[in-house]
Image (spheres, rainbow, N blue to C red):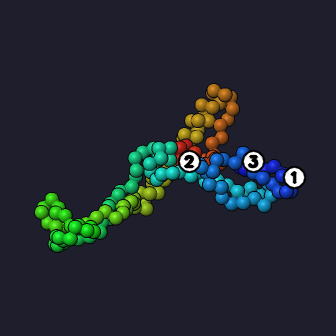
Amino acid sequence: MPEYKLDERLNVYREINAPPESTYLGLGWDENPESKRRHYRRYYTQELENVVEVMPKPSPFTSFNIMRGQSRGAKQKWWPFGAAAKQDDSGEVTNEQVVGKFKGIVTVQSEEDQKKYMQEKLQLVESLKEKLDELSKKRTGKELILDLDKLDTSEGRGKVEL
């Protein structure tokens, strides 16, 4: 949460201890220090699937190259300028080029299977909470209350959920 200090010269509140702009994007605004509308989003300089702390496993996406051009029957140009046609492995003339990449995830699952999975997942999380609470009582003598909705960031919630 942002903290504010009154700039007496201009009679406005200024944010103090803001995270660095190179790592976080500040969003929202605070009309006064109590409104708590301002928040931050973590900024990454590369695709999220390449950031290990966000996605510890390799990319979950299926990727396909998006091609442009003619793969068979293109005519060999004698003019040396521009995108020249080449021969592919079979000896056919082609002028195809990669112009982009498609990434996506396709999941096929029945509603029944999805409900069953979500119930099992909920039971595992509840069991984990109970065991962590039991461990905390043995070690510290205090009850551990684990509320997944109140963790600071979506990254933190994701780590606990995993």
Say left or right for 63 vs 95.
right
Residue 16's mark? 3
Say if 90 sits above or below 118 in the image.
below
Residue drawn at 40 percent across, 52 percent down:
60
Q: Nearer the viewer, residue 67 or 32?
A: 67
Which residue has dot 2 on it? 155
Residue drawn at 41 percent across, 57 percent down:
113
Please report whichever mark, 3 or 2, sits nearer to the chain's N-terminal start.
3
Q: Secondary structure at mark 2?
A: helix
Picture coordinates of residue 124 (x, y %)? 51, 44
Picture coordinates of residue 6 (x, y %)? 84, 51
Residue 67 lies in quadrant: bottom left
Q: Nearer the viewer, residue 124 or 14?
A: 14
Q: Distance of mark 3 from mark 1, alpha carbons? A: 14 Å
> Do the residues under discs 3 and 2 have CB atoms within 8 angstroms?
no
Which residue has dot 1 on it? 8
At label 3, which amino acid type do we have? Ile
Q: Distance of mark 3 from mark 2, alpha carbons? A: 24 Å
Q: How busy is the neighbourhood of tag 1: few (under 14 within 10 Å), some, or many (20 plus)?
A: few
At label 2, which amino acid type do we have? Glu
